[in-house]
Amino acid sequence: MANVSFHVNGEVRSVELDTRTTLLDALREHLLLTGSKKGCDHGQCGACTVIVDGRRIYSCLTLAVMHEGSEITTIEGLGQPGDLHPMQAAFVRHDGYQCGYCTPGQICASVAMLEEIRAGMPSHVTADLNVAPQLTAEEIRERMSGNICRCGAYSNIIDAITEVAA
């Protein structure tokens, strides 16, 4: 067992956990933040995506003890009903969800992905590594390829991301 403390959605949270507990299970089972979903539990679907220290990660693939002192943002920390994050509002406007299971991970990944582009981080499809990446549908598809939507709302998700980026 280990005592772990992190800043979750702007609040310091401390929990005693088995050292083998994933960040996803710590968030869902110990902190009762159930927005992040356990989809595949193998880092293949992206339903568990959260933002840790400004970077998007699959929370099912990392141990909670590895994030002592980290800043963690879950879907619950991005916005609230009546005060949605711009990405959440765009997903609603563009119907970027259907069943909604992947939506929290898609939104967290989208928010962090736009920050990656703003920071000039290239992707596998960035045409010129000497120039800041441009927000194109191809860039969005590549960068979001780790977040699976079984309902197939991809074009709507791209529309939502494009709107927020503008």
Image (cartoon, grey):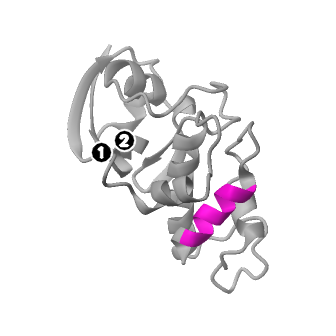
Q: CA distance from mark 2 to mark 1?
A: 7 Å
Q: Which residue is mark 2?
A: 76
Per the picture, the main secondary structure of the magenta-coloured stretch is helix
On the image, the x and y values in percent for residue 133 come to 66, 78
Badge 1 element: loop
Residue appearing at x 62%, y 52% in the figure:
95
Q: Is residue 136 magenta?
A: no
- Identify which amino acid the numbered label 1 is placed on: Asn
Q: Tell me which segment is drawn in magenta.
A: 155-163
Left or right of residue 13: residue 123: right
Front residue of this view, candidates 31 and 5: 31
Instruction: Please tell me which residue is depicted at 42% across the width and 43% down the height of the picture.
Output: 75
Q: Nearer the viewer, mark 2 or mark 1?
A: 2
Tag 2 near tag 1, CB within 8 Å = yes
For the point 72% across and 68% down, the residue is: 139
Number of disc labels = 2
Query: 151 or 51: nearer the eye?
Result: 151
| Disc marking residue 9 | 1
Q: Residues within 10 Å of mark 2 (few under 14, many from 20)?
A: some
Determine which quarter of the picture holds residue 84. Answer: bottom left
Closer to the N terminus: mark 2 or mark 1? 1
